[in-house]
Image (cartoon, rainbow, N blue to C red):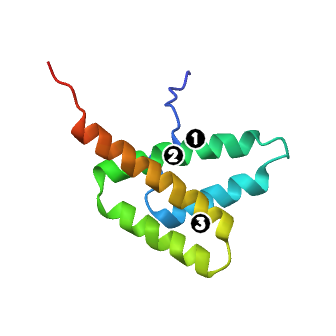
Amino acid sequence: MTGKFTRFDIKDFLHTPAELVHYVRACSELDSGDGRFNRVALRDYKQTIRLRIQSDPDFAQALRIEAATLFHNGETELASMLLAQLQVALRHQTARRFFTYRP
């Protein structure tokens, strides 16, 4: 009997900013020191932020509130990283809206 496998994509399971933060924390804890796991996490949450902002406009606001909570709790590095990626994703979305070339 052969099984059929589907491709696992973490972006399908990160629905809230809190889940995104927990994912980044878990990846940084499990990193062996070479940074490979952190690079994968960075790529995943960049793509997740972009996709969620496109499909849910309230996600950006919720992510900003989550980053403010992290700042308040003293986790400034993680909060500033999330805010930087949010800013990049918002710029990307704005650029796509204004510079969409259709023949």
Q: Earlier in the sequence, mark 3 or mark 2?
A: 2
Q: Quadrant of residue 57?
A: bottom left
Rendered image: mark on residue 46: 2
Q: Amino acid at mark 2?
A: Lys
Q: Quadrant of residue 63?
A: bottom left
Vertical side of 15 occupied by 92: above or below: above
Rendered image: mark on residue 79: 3
**Which residue is at the front of the view, 3 or 16?**
16
Q: Secondary structure at mark 3?
A: helix
Q: Secondary structure at mark 2?
A: helix
- Disc 3 and disc 2: Cα gap in Å? 14 Å
- The residue that label 1 is drawn on is 43
Q: Report if the CB atoms under discs 1 and 2 are less than 8 Å apart.
A: yes
Q: Position of residue 27 (x, y in %)?
A: 70, 52
- Residue at (45% x, 68% y) in the render: 64
- Disc 1 and disc 2: Cα gap in Å? 5 Å
